[in-house]
Amino acid sequence: MSDFVLDASLTLQWFLEDEAGREYSLAVLASLSEKRALVPLLWFYEVGNGLLMAHRRKRISSDQMGGFLARLAALPIDAARETATEILELPSLARSHNLTNYDAAYLALAIRSRLPLATTDSLLRKASAVAGVAIVTA
């Protein structure tokens, strides 16, 4: 059973040392020694693309990217099962909370699973408060 929903932007902060304000994200990472995270399938694409873009921009090496992916695979992160209907409802949720469709995927999963959300995204945090979704405290 998962303890919280994890978003991709927070996850990428674990590995991109030049990111500002990493304390919260690193505390969330440390909590995975005792907790489990739940992510939408989108998370895997976003994290992979974020690492690829960091590599292309010479922020990380090829070896670092491979190491980061291996470390992620070893963490207690569960992929949520999502139906086509749930995914097709995301634009409506995104529109009502002024989010991207991608960010709505994290909010929807937190709502559906009744779990708090770990995110550093200010718009997603605001939408979570409106939707009654707690933010993970680290």
Image (cartoon, rainbow, N blue to C red):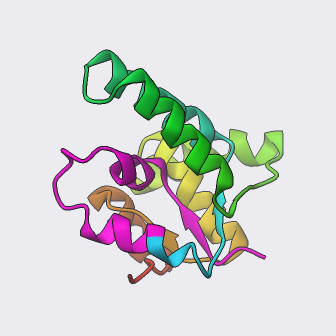
How many discs mark residues in the rendered view? 0
- Is 22 one of the magenta-colored residues? yes
Quadrant position of residue 88: top right
Can you say whether 138 is above or below 95 in the image?
Answer: below
Residue in the picture at 32% in, 57% down: 121
> Taking the image as drawn, is residue 98 in sight?
no
- The image position of residue 3, as x and y in percent, is 64, 78
Can you say whether 11 is above or below 35 in the image?
Answer: above
Task: Report the side of 21 relative to 83 (left or right).
Answer: left
The residue most toward the top is 56
Residue in the picture at 42% in, 56% down: 97
Span shown in magenta: 1-29
Task: Report the side of 38 relative to 17 (left or right).
Answer: right
Residue in the picture at 53% in, 31% down: 66
> Taking the image as drawn, is residue 83 in sight?
yes
- Is 19 one of the magenta-colored residues? yes
Q: Nearer the viewer, residue 11 or 80?
A: 11
Q: Nearer the viewer, residue 82 or 97?
A: 82
Quadrant position of residue 123: bottom left
Q: Nearer the viewer, residue 87 or 77?
A: 77
Can you say which quadrant of the picture contains the C terminus? bottom left
Can you say whether 62 is above or below 70 in the image?
Answer: above
- The image position of residue 38, as x and y in percent, is 66, 63
Can you say whether 1 is above or below 94 in the image?
Answer: below
Residue in the picture at 45% in, 27% down: 63
Can you say which quadrant of the picture contains the N terminus? bottom right
- The image position of residue 77, as x and y in percent, is 67, 59
Q: Nearer the viewer, residue 127 or 96?
A: 127
- The image position of residue 102, as x and y in percent, is 51, 41
